[in-house]
Amino acid sequence: MRAPQSAIPPAAPLKMSSTTSGPASATQSPVPPQPKKDNHASSASKPQKKPDRVLSPILRFKVRDLSSQGSRDFLKAVDAGTVVQEAVQGVVERLYTPSSVVPGTRSVTLILRPMEGVAYTTGKDYDSDHKEIHFSTDYIARIAKERKEDEILGVLRHEMVHCWQWNALGTAPGGLIEGIADWVRLQSDMAPPHWTKEGGGDWDAGYQHTGYFLEYLEQQYGKGSVMAVNEALRDKKYDEDKFWNKLFGHPVDKLWKDYGKSLKVQEEGGPKKEGNDSSNGRPRKLEIRDKDIKESRPQSKSTSALGTTPTAPSSTQPSKKKE
C-alpha cells in the first residue's frame, strides 16, 4: 500500500518537562478525557509502567462525516482521547530520554475524513508547531473486522512519530524518516501480520523495510541506537558518510549488507555473526546518556504521509495507496 509523503513538518525545540503544554485554541476544543479501554497501549492485564515524564500538548479530534462507515468503525473500535494521548507518550518514550530536547509540538489534531491513501501528517500553515494527522475513513472502512482496532492503533502510532521526530533540518532521507516511524510501531507491538524482513533493495526504501533494519541496529549495537539516530538528526544537515560512521563506525552500505547476511543466517538456523566492530570482532554497543542537550533551531517546514517515497515539502498531497 502506497501514498505520497515527504519529511516531517518543522517544530521549534522544546525542553522536556512534566508541565509543558500549549495554549488553548479559540476555535477548537481539546479532546475530553474518556475512560480507558483495553487495547495494545492500555491493557489491564499488563503492569503499567509509570512514564518518566508526560507531555501535554493540546489534543483535538475532528470527524468530517459522522455518517460514514469508516467514522463509525473508528469510534466503535477505539476511544479517540485515550489512544491519541497514549500515542504521544509511546512515541516520546521510545525516541527521547527525560532530559532530551524534543520538537516544540503544541497541539495535535486527528482528522477523520474521506480521502485516497491511508494517512498523512502535516503542520498548519500559520504555525507548524500545530500538527494535523489526516486519517482516511475510506481506508478504515476497508480494514478487516478482526484487524480494525490493531490497524487503527498502528497507523496512529506511525503518524504520531512524525509529530515528534527530528529530520536533519529537512535534509534526512524520506525512507529513514518513515523507517523510524515504523520502527516505533514495531517496538509498540503494533506491527501488522504481513510485515516481513527483507535484506534486498535499498536500505532507505522506508517503512517496515527500513524499520526492521533499524531494529537490527538496536539489537546489535545496544538499546538506544535508534534514539541516537533520531538525536543525530536534530540540528545538523544529513551527511550520509559522516552520519553512519560516527554512530556505528561503518558506512550504512556495510551495515545494510551485514543486516542482509544476518537474515540469511537466521533462515539457515545458524548463529548471528554480523554487525561486528572491526577492532575487536564484536558489535560496538552505543550508549545513550541522559544528559542536557542545547536548544536547536527550528526545522524547515514540510509534510509527511504514510505510504511512499518523499516529495517536495510544498507539494505533498495524499494519493491512492495500493493494497
Image: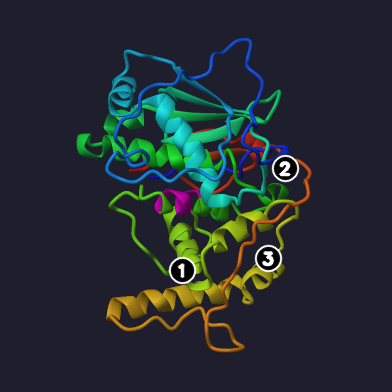
* Residue 279 quadrant: bottom right
Q: Left or right of 107: which side holds 90?
A: left
- Badge 2 vs badge 3, beta-carbon distance below 8 Å: no
CA distance separating discs 3 and 1? 19 Å
Q: Which residue is mark 3?
A: 243
Circles 3, 1 touching at the beta carbon (< 8 Å):
no
Of the two numbered discs 1 and 2 in the rendering, the one whose residue sits closer to the viewer? 1
Q: Which residues are magenta?
A: 181-186
Q: Residue at x 51, y 37 (%)?
A: 88
Which picture quadrant has residue 15?
top right
Residue at image position (29%, 39%) is 44
Residue 185 belongs to magenta span: yes
Q: What amino acid type is highlighted by mark number 1?
A: Gln
Task: Give the class, few, some or many, for how many residues have Cα within 10 Å of label 3's Cα (few <14, many ≥20).
Answer: some
Q: Which amino acid type is marked by label 2?
A: Gln
Residue 222 placed where, x, y %?
52, 69
Secondary structure beneath label 2: loop
Residue that numbered label 1 is attached to: 219
